[in-house]
Amino acid sequence: MAEHPDLDALRIRFARALHGARTTADGPDPVPYADDLLRRWSQPHRRYHTVAHLTAVLDHIDTLEQYAADPDVVRLAGWFHDAFYLPERSENEERSARLAERALPEAGVPEEKTAEVARLVRLTVTHDPADDDPDGQVLCDADLAILAAPAQVYAAYAAAVREEYHFVPEDAFREGRSAILRELLGHPRLFRTPHGQRHWEGAARRNLAAELAELKKLSR
């Protein structure tokens, strides 16, 4: 994950996705919408759910583009999926989806595609897309791809998540985090796209198991 993301490049990427989702060439300037989202992703309390994470998700969507039914709608969902993020709150995805429902029609995206973006954002609560939901599979795989990162990058991700939950006592965090890891390891498949299953599944399971083992060791 880049430490200093190229904000101009991100604005261009947002504009391309927005233009791709519009049904006409006309519409408001995409830049103010991109800037509002980038401000949200740049909030100082974020440690993992940052512009770097946004960039990584967009990069992974590009990798998985061939599996999506509407790649630009998936990209817009990537932009909105953590637009609201407060680690102590449980309605982040819902608030992010509602932001998309307000902003995208104003930005020129038709109702049907706006509804699909919002649906995809809400899907990141469970990361459990249906077998006949290629766009959901692409977004969820892109969001979870960090689990398959090289060990050092995964360790930095886990440390950043702990920083975001700095207000949780150590014992409670270890218990909660361990439960999440066990739940993930219990899934028959972490990734749903062919690329994710082929290239990310094994590495992700190794990382999750290693983190869980480390948490167990610290709990003794």
Image (cartoon, grey):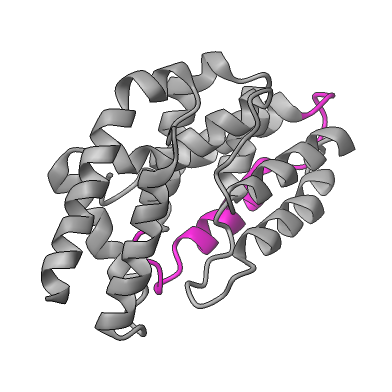
Q: Nearer the viewer, residue 161 or 217?
A: 217
Where on the picture, by quarter, is residue 105?
A: top right
Q: What stretch is highlighted in magenta?
A: 22-48
Q: Quadrant of the C terminus?
A: bottom left
At x 58%, y 37%, the residue is: 14
Q: Which residue lies furthest to the top in this view?
A: 66
Residue 37 covered by magenta stretch: yes
Where on the picture, by quarter, is residue 129?
A: top right
Q: Nearer the viewer, residue 51 or 212?
A: 212
Q: In this view, does 100 lie above or below 199?
A: below
- Tell me residue 125's x, y (percent): 59, 54
Number of numbered labels in the structure image: 0
Is 30 on the left-hand or right-hand side of 166?
right
Residue 195 covered by magenta stretch: no
At x 34%, y 65%, the residue is: 177
Residue 47 appearing in the image: no
Residue 98 appearing in the image: yes
- Tell me residue 171's x, y (percent): 26, 82
Is 77 on the left-hand or right-hand side of 162?
right
Q: Is residue 111 above or below residue 80?
A: above
- Tell me residue 182's x, y (percent): 35, 54
Is 75 on the left-hand or right-hand side of 161?
right
